[in-house]
Image: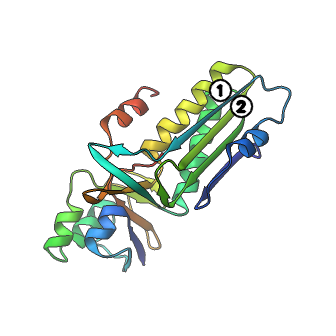
Amino acid sequence: MITVLFFAQVRERLGCAQIEVPFNDEVTTAESLRQHLAQRDEKWQQVLIADKLLVAVDQTMCDWQTPLTDNSEVAFFPPVTGG
Amino acid sequence: MENTHILVQQADFNVADEYTQLNQDDSDGAIVTFVGKVRNRNEGNDVSQLTLEHYPGMTEKVLQELAQEARERWPLNHIRIIHRVGTMNLGEQIVFIGVTSQHRQAAFDGCEFLIDFLKTKAPFWKLETTDKGDKWVDARETDQHATSLWQ
């Protein structure tokens, strides 16, 4: 299983903080997981296919081609604004 | 590293106590601290409260990595980073960064590097309560620029 987390505006707009997605051939990279989730409906499409969306795999910010494995933790979030 | 202290917490912090923790070694000739606060206006709106969300686990990991990176660039001794989460009122403290070194330039640079990188790398998000309703704070180009200057 891949654990998928959402934060800030992304969490709020999806109305979802965490889901589990079975690991399979369709979700082998951060990008393919995003495309897979975006197929859910128009809202998920709008929120996940956004220019500024960032992704972290196993708690490290990374690019969209980063490979996933079973038990990966993937987080989608907007640009960070701490400090 | 034992001289690196990183805390992500709801509670406020006391700068005098943090200073005492930093002020421990006679080899240090410089202590530089930074405090970030909730200010009353942002992008033309009156702000009354700020709520900080974060990614538990990743936040602490990223701050540890940034502290390590600062140590690779400058001869730093103590590093203390405290970042609050949850809801804060106007004027409250949000973040503390304190570093010590033999000489002032390393301490100034290390402190500035840490706050610049924290702002663009650590997974925190600010939600403002304003006179026009709640609003997620947009990331600033100037913060990205400040980070890029160190690279």
Structural distance between the alpha carbons of marks 2 and 1: 6 Å
- Residue found at x 55% / y 48%: B93
| Mark sitting earlier along the chain (2/1) | 2
Q: How many numbered circles does the render carry?
A: 2
- Residue found at x 42% / y 43%: B120
Residue sitting at the far right: B26
Name the amino acid type tagged 1. Ala
Residue B125 image point, x, y percent: 40, 55
Q: What colour scheme does the image use? A: rainbow
Residue B27 image point, x, y percent: 83, 25
Q: Residues within 10 Å of mark 1 (few under 14, many from 20)?
A: many
* Residue ID for mark 2: B100
The relative height of residue B96 versus residue B102 in the rendered view (above or below) is below
Quadrant of the frame with the N terminus of chain B? top right
Q: Quadrant of residue B10?
A: bottom right
- Residue found at x 61% / y 49%: B82
Q: Residues within 10 Å of mark 2 (few under 14, many from 20)?
A: many
Q: Which mark is residue B107?
A: 1
Q: Is residue A81 visible?
A: yes
- Which chain is disc 1 placed on? B
Q: Quadrant of residue A73?
A: bottom left
Q: Secondary structure at mark 2?
A: strand
Q: Quadrant of residue A54?
A: bottom left
Name the amino acid type tagged 2. Thr
- Which chain is disc 2 placed on? B
Residue B100 image point, x, y percent: 71, 31
Do labels 2 and 1 touch, CB within 8 Å? Answer: yes
- Residue found at x 42% / y 52%: A61
**Same chain for the residues under marks 2 and 1 in the image:** yes
